[in-house]
Amino acid sequence: MTHPPDALPWHTDNHQVLDFAAVLTAAGTLTTARDALDYLDDPHRFHPEHALWTRCGYPRPPSPDDLAQARQLGRTSPQATELRRRHHTAAATWDAFCALLDEFDHTGRRLLLRAGDRR
């Protein structure tokens, strides 16, 4: 999910605003109705969090459906192996994003994802 450089800002597109609200909710950032309303009222305030999500590759929580389908396919199925691998990769990526987001939320410091990254 990449956006061309000339695309409108994410917070002006209702679909992107709602999509990112789901991410923030899953990450535990939007936990109350007041949090959600504040976000929807002024989503551009969450630009640093959105930039972090973008730079992390738009991670999502892992789908439990992958593991359920893998169980149905059996332990030796190559498809089941791929589903388990995909689930574990998604879980690791999501956990890393949530840790970075939590650190940012608690410190307010800009996080660098790579040594020397100054964007």
Image (cartoon, grey):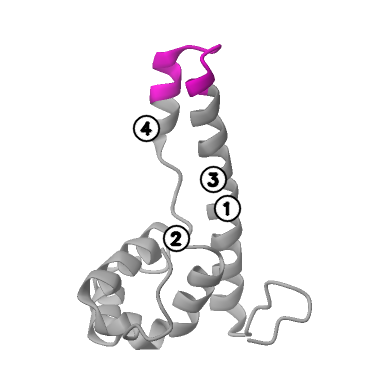
Tag 3 and tag 1, C-beta contact below 8 Å: yes
Judged left or right of residue 59, residue 93 is right
Tag 2 residue: 27
Q: Give the foreground label among 3 and 2.
A: 3
Amino acid on which the number 3 mark rests in the picture: Ala
Magenta stretch prevailing secondary structure: helix
Residue drawn at x 58%, y 85% is: 108
Residue beneath the point at 31% across and 82% down: 11
Q: Earlier in the sequence, mark 3 or mark 2?
A: 2
Find disc 3 in the rendering and name its residue.
Answer: 91
Span of residues in magenta: 69-80
Label 3 – label 4 distance at C-alpha: 13 Å
Q: Check contact, mark 1 vs mark 2: CB within 8 A.
A: no
C-alpha separation, residue under disc 2 versus residue under disc 4: 19 Å
- Residue position for label 1: 93
Image quarter hosting the C terminus: bottom right
Name the one closer to the observer, 60 or 37.
60
Outermost residue toward the right in this view: 115
Query: What residue would you read off at disc 4?
Result: 65
* Mark 4: amino acid: Asp
Residue 5 as seen in the image, left or right of residue 41: right
Q: CA distance from mark 3 to mark 1?
A: 5 Å
Quarter containing the N terminus: bottom left
x then y, percent, for residue 27: 44, 60
